[in-house]
Each structure stands twice: as C-alpha cells, then as structure tokens.
Amino acid sequence: MSEPASQTPRCGFIAILGSPNAGKSTLVNALVGTKVSIVSHKVQTTRVPVRGIVMEGASQLVLTDTPGIFQPKRTLDRAMVDAAWQRAGDSDAVLLVIDAAKGLDDDTLNILSRIKDQRILKIAVLNKVDRVEDKARLLALTAELTKHADFDKVFMISALDGRGVDDLRRYLARIVPEGPWHYSEDDVTDLPLRMLAAEITRERIYHWLHDELPYAITVETDSWKQLKDGAIRIEQTIYVERESQRSIVLGKGGATVKKISMESRKEMSEIVEAPVHLFLFVKVRENWGSDPERYREMGLDFPKSK
C-alpha cells in the first residue's frame, strides 16, 4: 500500500457507539463516501462490527460501525453488545452518536456510564439535527451531555443530508495517531464480499418486511462463482425460524422474494462492477439463534452462559 511521501501518515481505529437507530450506519456510510454498512428503519440491524475505511489527506480512518448498545435480552443481543464493547476497547477513540431529536435515552445513559472513566479520546456527535427545529435544544443537550462524561469535542450533524460530516471527517483526520496505514488507500471496508452480499440481501428483506418479520432471520452466502463471461453467480439462503415466516418472505406466488432478489442483485452488481446472477432460497432453521456455528459465520462470539 502506498503512503504520501510529503506528509506524515496517520492511522487510527475509531469505534462508533450509540443506541439502536441513532444513525451510526448512516454516518459511517457518509464518512466513507459509499455504502459499507446496512441501513434500515428496523433497530438493531447491524449485527457484526463493520469497518469502514476513510482516506482524508495523509490520514486513514478505520471506522468500526458497531451493533447498537442496548439492554440485551436474547443470546444474539448479548453477542452483539459484547462485540460492540470489545471493539470500543480496541480503538484509539470512541465516537458516541446520539439522536438529537430523542435526546439522552436510557441506552445512551448506560453507554455514558461505561465510557466516562475510560482513558480514551471521546467525541460526541449529535445526529439528526435536521429534525430539531428549536436549536436551543441542541445547546441544552450538549450541556447535559457534558455533565455525564468529558468529551474532547461535540459535533452537530445530519448524517442523512451530509450537514457537518466534512468537518467531522477533517477533525478525525487530525487527531488519529501517526503511523502506517493498515489498508490500501483504495479499500473502503474489510468486510468480505460474501458477507457484504449477505448484508445487502438482509437489508432489502427488512426494507420490505420490517413490520411483518422479527429479528429471527439471517442470510448466508452459500456459493460465489465467477463465470467465464465475467459475471458472478451468487447463491444465498435466507433462514427463518418458522414456516409462517418463510411464507412471508416468499410472498404470494414468490413475488416478495423476487422483489428482494432483483433489488439485491442490482446493488451487488454496482459494488462488484460486473453482472450478478443471484439465486435466493428460503429455509426454516428452528432456533438458529442458539446455534454457535451461526454466530461464527456472522463473525460474532457465542456468549457464555451467565
């Protein structure tokens, strides 16, 4: 990987923390400049920590989009929250994303209590400021926030429309430590293409079925083959826990799964810059959320019994 000869290279790992649906994934995608993380109306859609890689001048920012931190109830919940805290502990800085329209909810207060005494660079980001008409509320929220923890900087942004994102990117580029880059300057994520493809399909499922389906659904890429004409053939299995959920994903006459396949295929084709032939299968796998093998495939540690 090449590094600038005239400037001292910098590289830092930054964990993006926040309660579910604070806008962490949207912010990571905005900072990277392209989509690397799943975005959905449904909360807790980010299951595995996804790294987005940003180049800003001579600085390489490695952003870890972590699952939203909340009070875990299920085994999968615990694995997601454990992964988020593990990445935070391994980072050079933590960036706490707060939904400015909602303020400090219980999940955010829990995060603040965990990070307040940690000796790590802390940055707060008030996101979704476009939804706050009374800007005095933002100042009051900032004052309340700083009572709970010492932040090196507080930013007010809208990850959705890009407001304040460039200022945040430039600031992060200045504060990361000097050191060699960990990735090529052309990389935008370290997520394997097979896993990224599965995430894309999962996102489209939630887009169309977010009211009908619970979180007990996962997607696995079973096969990835490059054909002689340069096209990619991808086979994926969508796993649900009950037959009734399988019927929902399929839709009447297979209409819903065809719609999901068409949109997923289009997005995958844009990413790999080649035609994609996507084949989706929907299967019932009861209690997959209790199977350690499924966690390993998602890049998560299976939580120990408590």
Image (cartoon, helix red, strand yellow):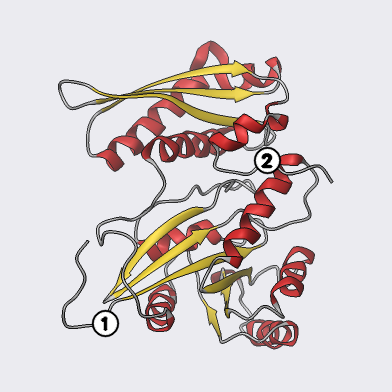
Q: Position of residue 43 (x, y in %)?
A: 65, 49
- Pointer 2 and pointer 1: residues touching (CB < 8 Å)? no
Residue drawn at x 17%, y 83% is 6
Q: Amino acid at mark 2?
A: Phe
Residue 225 point in image, percent of width and height = 29, 23
Q: Secondary structure at mark 1?
A: loop
The x and y percentages for residue 131 are 59, 69
Q: Which residue is mark 1?
A: 8
Taking 175 as reference, is 110 above or below it?
Answer: above
Decide: is 49 above or below 60: above
Question: Which residue shows up at 59% across the image and 79% down it?
Answer: 120
Q: Position of residue 1 (x, y in %)?
A: 22, 61
Residue placed most toward the observer, 107 or 137: 107
| Left or right, 174 with reference to 124 | left
Label 1 sits on what residue type? Thr
Say if residue 67 shows up in the picture. Answer: yes
Q: Locate residue 236 relative to residue 136 in the image: left or right.
A: left
Label 2 SS:
loop
- The residue most toward the right is 306
The crowd level at tag 2 (other Cα within 10 Å; few <14, some 14-19, many 20+) is many
* Distance of label 2 from label 1 (alpha carbons): 40 Å
Q: Which mark is residue 21?
A: none
Mark 1 crowd level (few <14, some 14–19, many ≥20, 10 Å Cα): few
Q: Residue furthest top?
A: 253
The correct choice, above or below, for 287 with respect to 97 in the image is above
Residue 160 seen in the figure:
no
Question: Mark 2 or mark 1: which comes first in sequence?
Answer: 1
Q: Which picture quadrant has residue 241?
A: top right
Q: Please give left or right for residue 269 compared with residue 61 in the image.
A: left
* Count of all numbered marks drawn on residues in the image: 2
Determine which of the numbered discs, if any, sits on residue 302 in the image: 2
